């Protein structure tokens, strides 16, 4: 269901992005990969770009084809670089790219955002997530972090909370809805990727180890790539505004604990 489609995939230098690009190409898609670093084995075309600024997003747009079938927003950072950079990469750059790519997406196309189980707290922190997601354009992210009191030690979960709230809202925004563009998210649990060690520093060993213990093992990139590509395909044409937990049952376990059932 991806044969002949053009997929724009960010974060292809390693981890989930690399596996998603590789699998998409294997399934017959034309892949345009984006990252700060060139992958060791590029699956399709590659564009070097930094999505942490409005200028970086504009530079990427200038090099893209006029027609794309799906955008996979996989690129993300762990939070070790601080609140401003993390919010810029994990949310504001992603949002800017999605909005500016929208006119090039075919009618009935798809956007898939890689969020995280770390964004589970979006309900408890809804007002902050809403305000972050409503900041117009590509804002001064350092000022935004200060404005809403986003601390460095919590910036990764906060970035994913904002991303999830924006995903739910974007699915019904005219920019996407009027052209039948579906906007969904995939939320992995702990995944054995190069930045898992960084997540341990940001979230703490106890949190990461507990999450892994709940579901018996950490995930892998091959666990996450197929659901991302499914949401890009015509097989998911009636799925919109959804967050697909790809976490071995971690969210179900946390729900049972938090809600008491």
Image: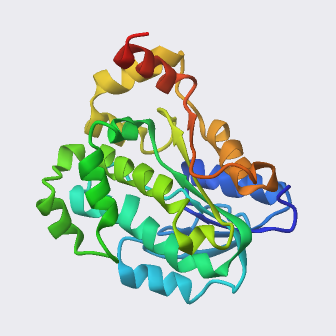
The extreme top residue here reads 261
Q: Is residue 40 left or right of residue 148?
A: right
Q: Nearer the viewer, residue 3 or 204?
A: 3
Q: Nearer the viewer, residue 204 or 149?
A: 149
Residue ID at (53%, 55%):
113
The coloring applied to the image is rainbow
- Quadrant position of the N terminus in the picture: bottom right
Q: Is residue 242 left or right of residue 36?
A: right
Residue ID at (65%, 81%):
104
Above or below for 190 versus 126: above
Q: Nearer the viewer, residue 43 or 251?
A: 251
Q: Is residue 80 shown to the viewer in this render? A: no
Q: Is residue 170 shown to the viewer in this render? A: yes
Q: Nearer the viewer, residue 205 or 169?
A: 169
Image coords of residue 183 (percent x, y): 59, 58
The extreme bottom residue here reads 62
Image coords of residue 29 (percent x, y): 80, 64
Above or below for 207 versus 26: above
Image coords of residue 60 (percent x, y): 52, 82
Q: Is residue 260 left or right of residue 234?
A: left
Residue 144 lies in quadrant: bottom left
Image coords of residue 222 (percent x, y): 67, 39
Instruction: Count every numbered label the image shows and give the total.
Output: 0
- Quadrant position of the C terminus in the picture: top left
């Amino acid at each position: 269901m991806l044969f002949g489609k053009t997929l724009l995939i960010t974060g292809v230098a390693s981890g989930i992005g690399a596996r998603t690009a590789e699998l998409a190409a294997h399934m017959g898609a034309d892949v345009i990969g984006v990252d700060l670093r060139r992958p060791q084995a590029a699956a399709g075309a590659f564009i070097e770009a930094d999505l942490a600024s409005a200028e970086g997003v504009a530079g990427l747009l200038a090099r893209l084809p006029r027609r794309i079938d799906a955008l996979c927003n996989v690129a993300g950072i762990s939070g070790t670089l601080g609140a401003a950079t993390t919010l810029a990469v994990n949310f504001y750059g992603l949002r800017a790219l999605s909005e500016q790519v929208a006119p090039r997406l075919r009618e009935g196309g798809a956007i898939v955002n890689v969020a995280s189980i770390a964004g589970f707290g979006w309900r408890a922190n809804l007002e902050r997530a809403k305000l972050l997601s409503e900041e117009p354009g590509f804002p001064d992210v350092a000022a935004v972090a200060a404005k809403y009191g986003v601390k460095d030690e919590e910036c990764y979960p906060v970035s994913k909370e904002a991303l999830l709230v924006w995903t739910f809202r974007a699915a019904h925004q005219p920019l996407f809805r009027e052209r039948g563009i579906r906007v969904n998210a995939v939320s992995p649990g702990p995944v054995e990727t190069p930045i898992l060690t960084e997540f341990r520093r940001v979230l703490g060993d106890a949190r990461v180890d507990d999450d892994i213990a709940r579901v018996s093992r950490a995930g892998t990139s091959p666990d996450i790539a197929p659901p991302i590509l499914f949401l890009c395909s015509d097989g998911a044409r009636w799925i919109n505004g959804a967050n697909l937990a790809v976490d071995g049952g971690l969210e179900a376990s946390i729900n049972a604990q938090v809600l008491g059932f």
